[in-house]
Image: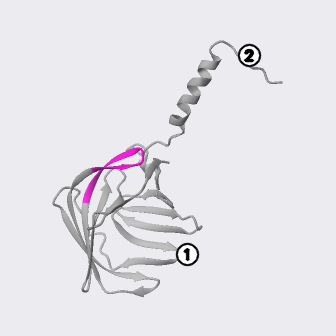
Amino acid sequence: MISFVTKPGAAALALCMLIAAPTAAQAACPTQATVAKGFLLRGSTAETEVRHLGDHFVQARTRYPDGVVQTDLYFDGLLAVSRFSQRGANMMLGADLEAWELELKKGASASLTYIPVADSKPFPKTTLELEVKGSETLELGDCSFEVLVISQTRRSGQRVRAYDQLYSPLLRFVIARRYPDGETRAYLGAEAM
C-alpha cells in the first residue's frame, strides 16, 4: 500500500527537485576547461563528436540517422584535410601544412594550394584563400560563442566558390558557414563531453 504521509519539508524538497530538474538535465556548454576533453555539436539530423589531436589536428566524427559514420580530419579546425565514410573518401594531396598559418586577427590572410582527391581520383589543382574579416557572436542552442568571420575562396581552374566560415577560437573549430546569398548553416547546439 502506498502511503502519502511524508515528513515535514519533504514535499517542499520534492517540489524544488522537480523545478530544478530541467536545469540539471541541460547539457553544459563547452568551456576553456572542457574543450580538451572534446565536445558534441548537434545538427538537425546528425551529431558530431569533435576532439583535438595535438596542436594542429582536429577529428570530427559525425553519426547520421542512416547509420553512416563520417570521420573528418581538420588542420587547425579550418582546413578539411581528409574525409572517410562508407560513402567514400577524399583528401588534400601536396598541401604544405607545415608552412601554412593564418593569424587569427582582422585583416590576416593566407592561402594554400593542393590537389583534391576523391575516391582515389585526383582533380585539378585547387587554391584556398582565407581572410579574417571580423568577429561576431553566434548562438548555438543555449550556448553563445565569439566567432571570427573568415572568408574562404576556393579556386580550381575557372571554377570559384566562396563563403564565410564562422570559426570559434574557444572551440578551435568552424561551427557555421555563411553563403553569399546570406544563408547561414550552423549547428543547432553544443555541449561539453
Q: Which residue is mark 1?
A: 86
Identify which residue, 180 or 104, lies in the foreground. 180
Identify which residue, 89 or 185, lies in the foreground. 185
Considering every residue shown, the one lying at the far left of the view is 107
- How many marks do you count on the picture? 2
Which corner quadrant of the image does residue 53 belong to? bottom left
* Place of residue 75 in the rendered image (x, y in percent of width and height, measured from the top left): 35, 65
| SS under mark 2 | loop
* Place of residue 112 in the rendered image (x, y in percent of width and height, measured from the top left): 26, 74
Q: Which residue is mark 2?
A: 5
What segment carries the magenta color? 137-149
Q: Amino acid at mark 1?
A: Gln
Where the N terminus falls, by quadrant? top right
Residue depicted at x 37% and y 52%: 171
Instruction: Give the vertical position of 73 relative to 86 (above or below).
Output: above
Bin the neighbour count of mark 2 within 10 Å (Cα to Cα): few under 14, some 14-19, many 20 and up. few
Identify which residue, 27 or 119, lies in the foreground. 27
